[in-house]
Amino acid sequence: MKFSLLVLAALLPACALAAEPPLRSAGAPVAKDAGKRDFVKEMDLPQASAERDVRVQITATTMTTIGAAMAGRLSQFPLKDGDRFREGQLLARFDCAVQDGAVARARASYEKRRKIYDIQQKQRQLGSNSALDFEVAGAELREAGADVAAAQAMSSRCTLAAPFAGRVAAVTAREHQYVAEGAPLLEILSDRDLELEMMVPSRWLGWLKVGTHFEVAVEETGQTYAASLIRVSGKVDAVSQSIKVYGRIPSGGDALLPGMSGRALFHPPS
């Protein structure tokens, strides 16, 4: 029994040594500290380049979705995705035989009421009719004129004209298709009035002002364009300590399209 206790006592220190992790050499860094240093190094690199380099996206300032002003069948729908159009150009036309008939009927009724009014006016001058007959004829003429205006307003909804010059960005209908009132038909935009949107550190406001010049390297075209700052947002994001700013490229030609992106290269003062 005493011999077993002595053997157990002798083995315990060896087991404790075996359970300990192997000793690191003096030059080997601690894994935790090494990861921390790598993380700091990775964070330092963007901070060094962020002083002049931010992400930017090209957007269209004028963009809208053209919806159907009435329910009906599209008799003309000439434009396709990517097509250019002029201001006032026809975008869509509905089959409006009923509306056109209503306009013709309203005009015919107006002409009849106008002739009756002219006769009542002449008779009134001769004193051969009553004042009531003359007033009724005038009221009926005004009523017929209102009917013509209402019919023309309904007929005007049969055609959709371009509100500005631009380009088709998306098509959601087809010619001869029956669409409901308010259904989207086209998404159009002005590709001549483009802006640059970007988020910059709010500390840049000390030197970044409207009119500041910078360069924009667009990835899709592989070209660098001169640009200038045109607007600064009215609110700073307190969480990210950043603010949205807007710029404009004076001349980019047909190569630039909304949705393109790249890098904005600023030159802050020393």
Image (cartoon, helix red, strand yellow):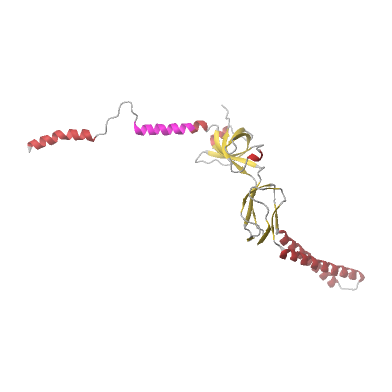
> Along the line of sight, which residue is nearer the eye, 75 or 21?
75
When asked about the image quadrant of residue 134, the answer is bottom right
Name which residue lies at 19% across and 35% down: 15
Looking at the rendered structure, the number of numbered marks drawn on it comes to 0
Is 19 left or right of 269, judged from the image as shown?
left
Query: What is the magenta range?
Result: 30-45
Observer able to see residue 202: yes
The reply to whether the magenta stretch includes residue 35 is yes
Determine the residue positioned at 35% across, 33% down. 31
Q: Quadrant of residue 129?
A: bottom right
* Quarter of the picture holding the N terminus: top left
The x and y percentages for residue 83 are 66, 48
Q: Is residue 181 above or below residue 60?
A: below
User: Which of the pair 123/168 is nearer the observer?
Assistant: 168
Give the main secondary structure, helix, strand or loop, of the magenta stretch: helix
Horizontal relation, residue 92 to residue 39: left or right: right
Location of residue 230 in the rendering, given as x and y in whole percent from the top left corner: 63, 38
User: Percent x, y for residue 133?
Assistant: 84, 72
Looking at the image, is 177 positioned above or below residue 199? below
- Residue 109: x and y in percent read 79, 68
In terms of image quadrants, where is residue 174? bottom right
Q: Quadrant of the C terminus?
A: top right
Specify whether residue 42 is painted magenta: yes
Residue shown at the point (75%, 61%) measured from the top left? 152
